[in-house]
């Protein structure tokens, strides 16, 4: 058996299985019961300073 055939069989069987398991693991990790607060916090990032913008540090520097 040459190298290409061996790697092709390996990719078609075990590597494919490992990639599917990894994908399913990521999906389960993202939808786990305790992650709702993490996702809610991340979704609010663009709106954190809507009412009071962050002060511009360049505007507060003394001018010489």
Image: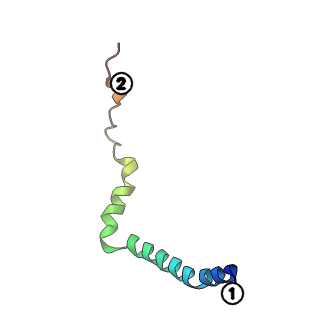
Horizontal arrangement in the rendering, residue 27 relative to residue 13 (left or right): left
Q: Residue at x 32, y 22 (%)?
A: 61
Q: Earlier in the sequence, mark 2 or mark 1?
A: 1
Residue at 64% across / 83% down in the picture? 6
In the image: residue 27, left or right of residue 48: right
Residue 58's place in the image compared with 12, above or below, is above
Tag 1 residue:
1
- To which quarter of the image does residue 43 belong? bottom left
Q: Residues within 10 Å of mark 2 (few under 14, many from 20)?
A: few
On the rendered image, what quadrant is the C terminus found in? top left
Write the residue at 32% across / 41% down. Answer: 51
Residue 58: horizontal and vertical position, in percent? 37, 26
In the rendered image of this protein, does residue 32 appear above or below residue 61?
below
Task: Work out whether 2 lies above or below 34.
Answer: below
6 or 30: which is nearer to us? 6
Q: Which numbered disc, 2 or 1, marks the residue closer to the eye?
A: 1
Identify the secondary structure beneath mark 1: loop
Q: Which residue is mark 2?
A: 59
The answer to which of 61 and 49 lies nearer the viewer is 61
Mark 1 Cα within 10 Å, few/some/many (few <14, many 20+)? few
> Which quadrant would residue 14 be assigned to in this image?
bottom right
Farthest front residue in view = 2
* Number of numbered callouts drawn: 2
- Pick the quarter of the image with the N terminus: bottom right
Quarter of the image for residue 35 reads: bottom left
């Amino acid at each position: 058996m040459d190298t290409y055939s061996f790697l092709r069989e390996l990719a078609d069987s075990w590597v494919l299985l490992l990639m599917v398991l990894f994908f399913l693991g990521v999906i389960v990790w993202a939808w786990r019961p305790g992650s709702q607060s993490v996702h809610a916090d991340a979704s609010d990032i663009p709106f954190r300073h809507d009412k009071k913008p962050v002060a511009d540090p360049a505007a507060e520097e003394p001018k010489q």
